[in-house]
Image: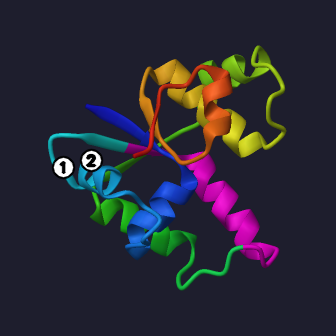
Amino acid sequence: MKYLIDTHTFLWFGTEDDLLPSRIHALIQNPDNDIRISIASFWEIGIKNSIGKLPLNTNILGLEQQAHDLDIEILPITIQAIHQVTSMPSHHKDPFDRIIAATALTMGETLLSADTIFDSYGVSRLWE
């Protein structure tokens, strides 16, 4: 199966954080699954790190390498996803979450995220 992972899911997976449910951890580690992340997640991490809201032990290039090492595909922001954002209701003002939701919708992928706001957009979300 193909899964899109949310920003926090990627960070928690990389740090073995106890907040990541074991089922989600197993899905990401399963070589039969295609795991993807939006480039918007790296943009979000970079901005939050630069303003002091998200301290990191590495930089964006290190996180990119981590994704590569974990066989996580980094997806570009597509024109289809941008178009999807323009027609989405304003349930959430966070532009990163909106483009991640739009990416999940346009790609038809299940989003691995703890954030229930995605449910209001009709995103297929898994977190247990």
- Give the residue displayed 55% in from the left and 25% down from the top: 123
Q: Position of residue 38 (x, y in %)?
A: 53, 44
Question: Could you tell me how many numbered marks the image carries?
Answer: 2
- Mark 2–mark 1 distance (CA, rounded to whole Å): 5 Å
Say few, some or many: other residues with alpha carbon within 10 Å of mark 2 (under 14 / 14 to 19 / 20 or more): some
Q: Position of residue 21 (x, y in %)?
A: 38, 57
Residue contact at pointers 2 and 1, CB within 8 angstroms: yes
- Relative height, residue 65 to residue 98 (above, below): below
Residue closest to the eye, 15 or 60: 15
- Using residue 2 as the reference point, say whether residue 55 is left or right of it: right
Disc 1 residue type (three-letter): Asn
Look at mark 1 in the image and give the residue it sits on. Answer: 30
| Magenta highlight: main SS | helix
- Give the residue displayed 65% in from the left and 63% down from the top: 45
Asked whether 24 falls inside the magenta stretch, the response is no
Q: Which residues are magenta?
A: 36-53
Residue closest to the eye, 91 or 96: 91
- Using residue 31 as the reference point, say whether residue 110 is left or right of it: right
Describe the element under mark 2 as helix, strand or loop.
helix
- Relative height, residue 91 to residue 69 (above, below): above
Residue lying at the far front in this picture: please name it: 128
Quadrant of image for the N terminus: top left
- Give the residue displayed 34% in from the left and 50% down from the top: 24
Say which quarter of the image contains residue 69. bottom left
Say few, some or many: other residues with alpha carbon within 10 Å of mark 1 (under 14 / 14 to 19 / 20 or more): few
Asked whether 46 falls inside the magenta stretch, the response is yes
Q: Position of residue 46 (x, y in %)?
A: 68, 66
Disc 2 residue type (three-letter): Leu
Say which quarter of the image contains residue 94. top right
Look at mark 2 in the image and give the residue it sits on. Answer: 27
- Using residue 91 as the reference point, say whether residue 118 is left or right of it: left
